[in-house]
Amino acid sequence: MGATIIRCEGLTKYYGRNRGIEDLTFEVRPGQVYGFLGPNGAGKTTTIRCLLSMLKPTRGKAYLFDKEVSVNGRGLRYRIGYVPGEVSLYEKQSGRWMLDYVSGLRGGSGPAEAELCARLEFDPARKIRELSKGNKQKLALIIALMHNPDLLILDEPTSGLDPLNQQVVFDIIEERVQAGATVFLSSHILPEVERVCDRIAIIRDGRVVAEEAVGVLLTKAIRTVEVTYVEPIPEQFIQSISTKTAVERIGDNVLRARVSEDIDGVLRQFLELPIIDITVEHASLEEVFLQYYGHTQEGALS
Amino acid sequence: MNWTIFKSSLHLRRNTLLWYSLGITLYGWLIVAFYPLIEKNADYLDLVQSMLTPELMAIFGGANLDFATIGGFLGIEYLNLFWIFIVSAAIITFAASELAGAVDDGTMEATLAQPASRLQVAFVRYLAMAAYAAALNLVTILTLYIPGLIHNVDVPLDSMLLLFAIGWLLTMAIGSFAYMVSALSTGSGRVVGISLGTLLAMWLADVLGNITDKVDWLKNISLFHYWQPVEVIDKLSVASESWLVFGVAVVLFFAVAMWAFQRRDVV
């Protein structure tokens, strides 16, 4: 077995009788950007909290850098930057105080702090309670990134950020990966994952139901394609397309289709007639689940 | 010793420490300033005291208290009851915030995501609580001693130093209990409720044990029974069992708190 950055072996967590996660087994290799997807309540945050020793697993083991987290937690956390799903900070203090507090716990100030504050346009002088959700998220990101950790564990890292700042965050993440960092990214926003991840696990009801390279997952993802034609659409044209994909007529000139595979081929068919407009929307993650993994809920795929 | 955790704990509670200190100062100063008037009317007070029922005297710390001595007066009016509840409120709030409150508001997650072990966090925050308790007790004796000098009331310095020591240990016994509850449960409100409720039950046990011989044993399970500030001030003495009971309570509750906090989930 080669070196791993994250390894979970049968990781299980119950809150009393309530299931948190069940028999989770996966590993993340050095330099990977690993997406951890699922709807709210699927068990993403529980998994992360087990990795950080916040939660004691009911069964199974979690390893970071090939060391068991329950034994080596403190030392391992020197190498980890973490952005929680719900950012909770000392509200009455300033951003400066919070940055100094974390630096004190880590034994020195973060070498990338000033650069991150500048790039994210964050003013650390302000009290945390006066910050918007987006600015609190920026502070959480600076805290996680400023010591240049080897592993970034990011739980919904762009929550509350505007598109411009989301772009900056993903630029930073990509730079860190190029510099050798590994990223574990939990999200339920498919485009976000699509952009940065090279491998993905889908968690549902506490279990991993699929684990694939991102390219493979995207070919399976459902898209809704809506095309507006110049002229009313002939029935024969619809029938010819319907042999390959489910097509719905919305009006005389508009067709809508849900496409899961071979989007290139389907679009070529649609474009055989002159069009005015075309929109392609990603399906929600829940729709992806229903389309491809609904039948595998009871057991994990390898 | 992680000074970042220690300093941040005290920094975050500096305003509450200030307010409790202000309360203690005003109360203590007022009582000492009032004492010369009481002393001049000792005969009248003896008469008043003889009219008070044993039950009423028990509420303020026992039937054998004497208004006419500085220790007796401070005990009845301040240290036997009101001071304990002021200091308890302060230390219980501190203990509740440091573990259960921090878990509840998410700041514990922010701390434990950094390279700090649970044992380290819980231990250093406990030390910060000990410093907080020392500050409260220091303010207590200073605001009795200094007004004593100003108002010509003989508040002996050696008695004050002994009062500081035993008062700090009592505060830590109460604080350690709250810290243990804080390590075991969620929500600072619950910790405050359980701790103050337990303290109230102990006070009632002490009162009942002093009132009736049938349940005389009850007072032995109460921390209030071992807190005798009158003896400290007037006779410069502390019963060895007081040191022992408070000391054992501190060690026991502290040990359980450390053990429990390492095993709990932080969510």
Image (spheres, coloured by chain):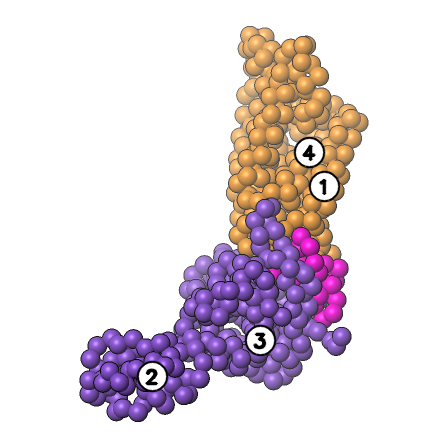
Coordinates of residue A283 in the picture (x, y in percent): 41, 73
Chain letter of disc 1?
A: B
Counting residues from the start of the chain, the first of labels 1 and 4 encountered is 4
The local crowd at label 1, few if under 14, some if 14 to 19, many if 20 or more residues have their Cα within 10 Å, is some
Q: Can you tell which of label 2 and label 4 is closer to the viewer?
A: 2
Give the residues drawn in magenta, as a range.
A46-72
Discs 2 and 1 carry the same chain letter: no
Chain letter of disc 3?
A: A
The image quadrant that residue A109 belongs to is bottom right
Counting residues from the start of the chain, the first of labels 2 and 3 encountered is 3
The image quadrant that residue B116 belongs to is bottom right
Image position of B37 with respect to A25: above or below: above
- Image point (63%, 40%), residue name: B181
Q: What amino acid is labelled 2 in the image?
A: Ile
Q: Colour of chain A?
A: purple
- Image point (56%, 49%), residue name: A18
Q: Of the numbered discs in the image, which one, if any, rests on residue A241?
A: 2
- Image point (25%, 91%), residue name: A274
Coordinates of residue A172 in the picture (x, y in percent): 54, 80
Discs 1 and 4 carry the same chain letter: yes
Q: Can you tell which of label 1 and label 4 is closer to the viewer?
A: 1
Separation of residues labelled 1 and 4 (CA atoms)? 18 Å
Discs 4 and 3 carry the same chain letter: no
Separation of residues labelled 2 and 1 (CA atoms)? 71 Å
Q: Nearer the viewer, residue B75 or B183?
A: B183
- The residue that mark 3 highlights is A212
- Image point (61%, 48%), residue name: B99
- The residue that mark 1 highlights is B256
> Dot 1: what SS?
helix
> Dot 3: what SS?
strand
